[in-house]
Image (cartoon, helix red, strand yellow):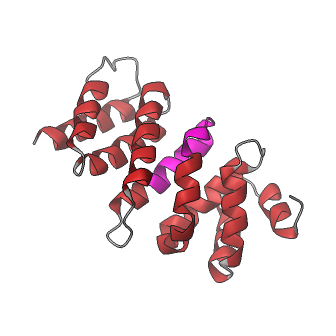
């Protein structure tokens, strides 16, 4: 893919300002969101992480623009391996789970839940785990088995984890058991 928009994404940095500029451009020109999703969902593309960062910002600002792409997103969610991409993707999952306007279908929810549980087992990053725990907890209100799995996963020994991770675990376990 070699378009001017792709080049914009490719030259973006982790700094907030360049990501905000592309986010705003996409919000003003929603036709580019499909290209952004294509880049983000292609985990073979070295720029997919940058696209995930921008997509997260779009979803935080105007989640409804993401609705036409939820199927593609949920189909490719298990492909993400980079911690940096997973952080953004887990936040998007949290936005979707919290949304009062957007309803995921059962298949989308299942794919997101399954991947989230896998991430919790595998991750060493506190932020990724915290966002994942939170979206799983919300979806666990609909599917009680999810919160049962969360209790089991989060009750594991976590003394080797960061204080942020331990705080998130304590918070979610408290919510589940109250």
Q: For this rendering, which residue is in front, 85 or 127?
A: 85
Q: Is residue 131 magenta?
A: no
Q: Which of the 4 quarters of the picture holds residue 58?
A: bottom right
| Residue 4 seen in the current view | yes
Q: Where 143 sits versus 71, above or below?
A: above
Q: Where 29 sits versus 16, above or below?
A: below
Question: Magenta segment, which residues?
Answer: 77-93
Q: Which of the 4 quarters of the picture holds residue 46?
A: top right
The main secondary structure of the magenta stretch is helix
Give residue 44's position: percent from left, percent from top. 76, 41
- At x 87%, y 69%, the residue is 4
- At x 51%, y 69%, the residue is 67
Q: Quadrant of the C terminus?
A: top left
Q: Where 112 sits versus 123, above or below?
A: below
Q: Quadrant of the N terminus?
A: bottom right
Give residue 54's position: percent from left, percent from top. 64, 61
| Residue 88 seen in the current view | no
């Amino acid at each position: 893919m070699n378009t001017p928009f792709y080049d914009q994404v490719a030259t973006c940095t982790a700094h907030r300002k360049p990501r905000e500029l592309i986010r705003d451009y996409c919000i003003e020109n929603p036709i580019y969101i499909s290209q952004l999703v294509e880049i983000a969902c292609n985990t073979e593309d070295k720029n997919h992480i940058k696209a995930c960062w921008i997509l997260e910002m779009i979803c935080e600002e105007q989640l409804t623009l993401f609705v036409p792409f939820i199927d593609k997103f949920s189909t490719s969610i298990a492909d993400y391996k980079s911690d940096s991409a997973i952080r953004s993707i887990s936040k998007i999952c949290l936005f979707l789970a919290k949304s009062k306007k957007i309803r995921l279908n059962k298949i989308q929810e299942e794919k997101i839940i399954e991947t989230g549980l896998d991430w919790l087992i595998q991750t060493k990053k506190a932020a990724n785990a915290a966002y994942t725990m939170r979206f799983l907890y919300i979806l666990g209100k609909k599917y009680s088995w999810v919160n049962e799995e969360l209790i089991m996963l989060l009750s594991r020994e976590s003394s080797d984890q960061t204080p942020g991770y331990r705080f998130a675990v304590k918070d979610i376990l408290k919510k589940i058991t109250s």
